[in-house]
Image (tube, rainbow, N blue to C red):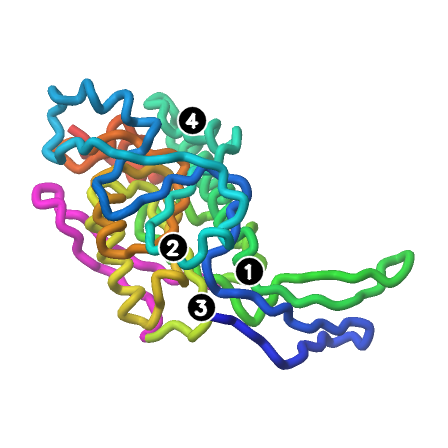
Amino acid sequence: MACSISNTFRCCSDTLRFVPRQQQCGRINPNPSSLLSFNSSPILAQNLCASSSSSSSSSSSFPRRNIRGRTKMAASEGSINGSNRMLVFVPPHPLIKHWISVLRNEQTPCPIFRNAIAELGRLLMYEAAREWLPTVVGEIMSPLGAASVEFIDPREPIAVVPILRAGLALAEHASSVLPANKIYHLGISRDEKTLLPSVYLNKLPDEFPKNSRVFLVDPMIATGGTIIAAMDLLKERGLSVQQIKVICACTAPPALSKLNEKFPGLHVYAGIIDPEVNEKGFIIPGLGDAGDRSFGTESHLG
């Protein structure tokens, strides 16, 4: 879908005049990042294959799959636009690895955990926003002369949809990354026994504007039930898969397999991919319960 803008945007001062820069609304540019490409066959991250052979004694109720994957450096999302495969980007930034390590530590106290997950979210949204934001170009006067400039177009804000409650922590710094953004809250809980999702809060608009771009934010994508329910709600409101990017701290193969089957072409940005999910629906080794650890409430891992 082409997001073309033909009108001219004029700021209050006569010295500022901006013309929107034509952008493609398609899949563009996390450059560089580790890229995991999925096709219709069973999938698993290449860097997890080594550990999967010793998993026969795992207590997980989700079968471990022999995943065939490939990791490569993505020069540009533009070079893979039009692909019908789901793509998972794990940016190889040392700060992302650092914050994941802080989050994994069971001794990390609540305030530090919440700060760490917010910082991780900032970095992942930065990578996901690369060349995905509409801009306006023009000329302004600097203290020493005229300068060509390019700003984010404030008329086309990115919609950020955190899935409550843990998504609030991961999306906390969205406004520091995205100069133009709107926040829509979506509350989905998961039954601890059936692992089925239930929507308890929905602040999404009845229909998203035609050229919307949406970050769907959920720290832990384990079994896939919650994120699929959220994706369905977004699609019901007029969005295509190409208009949505998923942001998560940690994910695992059961969820990625389901997302790939139902939403081919989806792009997921993750801090890390872990090998398995246990019978209670928690990622192993994971981060624990991201909501409880972010907000200091009692954990239900046991």
Question: In the image, is 29 to the left or to the right of 278?
Answer: right
Q: Give the spatial CA distance, label 2 vs label 4.
A: 35 Å
Quadrant assignment, res 266: bottom left
Q: Amino acid at mark 1?
A: Leu
**Label located before the other in sequence (3 or 2):** 2
Residue 103 covered by magenta stretch = no
Q: Which residues are magenta?
A: 182-206
Q: Amino acid at mark 2?
A: Ser
Identity of the residue drawn at 70% across and 61% down: 150
Q: What residue did someone put label 1 on? A: 133
Q: What residue did someone put label 3 on? A: 212
Which SS class for mark 1? loop
Q: What residue did someone put label 2 on? A: 83
**Are the residues at dot 2 and dot 4 in contact (C-beta closer than 8 Å)?**
no
Q: Give the spatial CA distance, label 1 vs label 2.
A: 21 Å
Decide which of 37, 257 is in the foreground and name it.
Answer: 37
Which SS class for mark 4? helix
Identity of the residue drawn at 67% across and 77% down: 9
Question: In the image, is 256 to the left or to the right of 87?
Answer: left
Q: Give the spatial CA distance, label 3 vs label 4.
A: 34 Å
Disc 4: CA contacts within 10 A as few (<14), some (14-19) or many (>=20): some
**Label located before the other in sequence (3 or 4):** 4
**Label located before the other in sequence (1 or 3):** 1
Identity of the residue drawn at 15% across and 28% down: 302
**Label located before the other in sequence (2 or 4):** 2
Q: Amino acid at mark 4?
A: Val
Decide which of 174, 240 is in the foreground and name it.
Answer: 240
Residue 287, image x, y percentages:
32, 31
**Are the residues at dot 3 and dot 2 in contact (C-beta closer than 8 Å)?**
no
**Are the residues at dot 1 and dot 3 in contact (C-beta closer than 8 Å)?**
no
Identity of the residue drawn at 54% across and 44% down: 75
